[in-house]
Amino acid sequence: MRERGEMVELILPATSRYLQVARLTVSGVASRAGLSIDDIEAIKLAVGEACTNAVEHAYASAVGTERGEARIRICCGVQGKEFVVEVTDEGAGFDFDAVDLDRDVPPPPESGLGFFLIRSSVDRLDVDSAPGGGTKVTMAKRLSG
Amino acid sequence: MRAAGEVDAYNAAELRQVLEQARSEEGARILVCLKQVPYIDSTGLGVLVGVYKQTAESGGHLVVCCPAPQVRKVFEISGVEQLIQLHPDEASGLAALRRAKGGASDA
């Protein structure tokens, strides 16, 4: 883990064993940035879901990636008036446009609930992904004051 | 059953295994206490919803009690609270199970 300016960068093996490490690290950085308890809990949930997607989906179906070599890169910190978290993987990628996040009723847990929870937890969500090209999920919470 | 610790994709299978065992009896009535669970994600919710449905199909009932505020919020925004009853304490959860006649939630 190292600091990049005001951003903290963390690279973890893409296994579920390290999901808690990802959440706790980002929570700690968010706390240092002055986020409220509620906002920290929200960002913790969002980061957990984004990392779970990488572990459970991106690398699960990636061709030519040895499981032991797969990594998730997490970068977080204050940028302007936001607390920003980026979760990047080099896995299978997917068509984010096919994910229906505009629905009023949450999807069932086994189908798309992760991104629904992320969108409900943060103020900004950007997903850059393409089949075969990895995924970068950018999530941001506005700083108060 | 009493769960403890953060529930995510790493240990959700363990939770499923314990709950599957609890529901193996026909008409099982299961109270899941989340008092010591500070975090649950979509994987953990998926386990609870799956076991809830299986329990209901076999004439049983499953309710949850003592969720921490942040855990309750995940139930709320996911819509799972519309399916699985949440009770503030064990006593009300047990009372709901006693009232339940099995099958779908009476919430």
Image: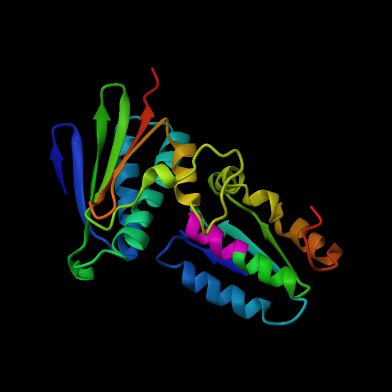
Left or right: B90 as drawn, with respect to A7: right
In the displayed image of the protein, which residue is found farthest to the bottom? B25
Residue B39 higher or lower than A138, as above or below: below
Question: What residue is shown at x 69% (from left), y 49% (from top)?
Answer: B82
Residue A71 higher or lower than B18, as above or below: above
Q: Return the x and y of residue A48 as percentages of the image width and height.
A: 39, 51
Q: Return the x and y of residue A127 as percentages of the image width and height.
A: 33, 40
Q: Return the x and y of residue A86 as percentages of the image width and height.
A: 27, 41
Say which of A6 and A102 sits in front: A102
Q: Return the x and y of residue A25 as percentages of the image width and height.
A: 29, 48
Query: Magenta region's main secondary structure?
Result: helix
Q: Quadrant of residue A63?
A: bottom left
Left or right: A132 as drawn, with respect to B47: left
Query: Which region of the structure is painted magenta?
Result: B40-49
Question: What residue is shown at x 36% (from left), y 24% (from top)?
Answer: A143
Quadrant the N terminus of chain B occupies: bottom right
Left or right: A84 as drawn, with respect to A40: left
Q: Quadrant of residue A118?
A: top left
Residue A56 higher or lower than A96, as above or below: below
Is residue B93 rendered magenta in the image?
A: no
